[in-house]
Amino acid sequence: MSRRYRTDRAGYRNEVMNIWLDSHVSTLTASLSMNCHLAAGQASNPNTSIARLSADSKEFNSIAHII
């Protein structure tokens, strides 16, 4: 009986983790999409600094690596 309980509990934990990961990946994907959209607008603006575009690129790469 206790073995079945452990299996059920592990399954429950896995299900909760999957839900948590799904919600965070969705949030990160939406954030990346918005950042790309904003970066595209900034890149077309001649007043945007190279340092700012470089920082955005590094942020994008670090978040993409997490996903």
Image (cartoon, rainbow, N blue to C red):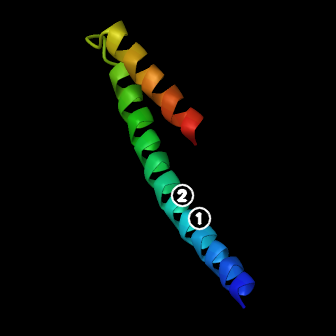
User: 21 or 35: which is nearer to us?
Assistant: 21
Q: Is residue 8 left or right of residue 45?
A: right
Question: Compared with residue 36, is residue 11 higher up or lower down, i.e. above or below?
Answer: below
Q: Residue at x 38, y 18 (%)?
A: 55
- Snapshot quadrant of residue 38: top left
Task: Pinpoint residue 59: horizontal percent, then vertical percent.
Answer: 43, 27
The residue labelled by disc 2 is: 21
- Inspect the image, locate mark 1, and give the three-letter code of the amino acid beneath it: Asn
Residue at the left extreme of this rendering: 47
Q: Residue at x 34, y 9 (%)?
A: 51
User: 9 or 22: which is nearer to us?
Assistant: 9
Question: Compared with residue 54, is residue 6 higher up or lower down, i.e. above or below?
Answer: below
- Snapshot quadrant of residue 49: top left
Distance between the alpha carbons at the discs numbered 1 and 2: 5 Å
Residue at the front extreme of this rendering: 2
Q: Residue at x 54, y 61 (%)?
A: 22
Crowding near pointer 2: few (<14 within 10 Å), some, many (20+)?
few
User: 55 or 47: which is nearer to us?
Assistant: 55
Q: Do the residues under discs 1 and 2 have CB atoms within 8 angstroms?
A: yes
Quadrant in the picture for the N terminus: bottom right
Residue at the bottom extreme of this rendering: 1
The residue labelled by disc 1 is: 18
- Label for residue 37? none
- Inspect the image, locate mark 2, and give the three-letter code of the amino acid beneath it: Leu
Secondary structure under badge 2? helix
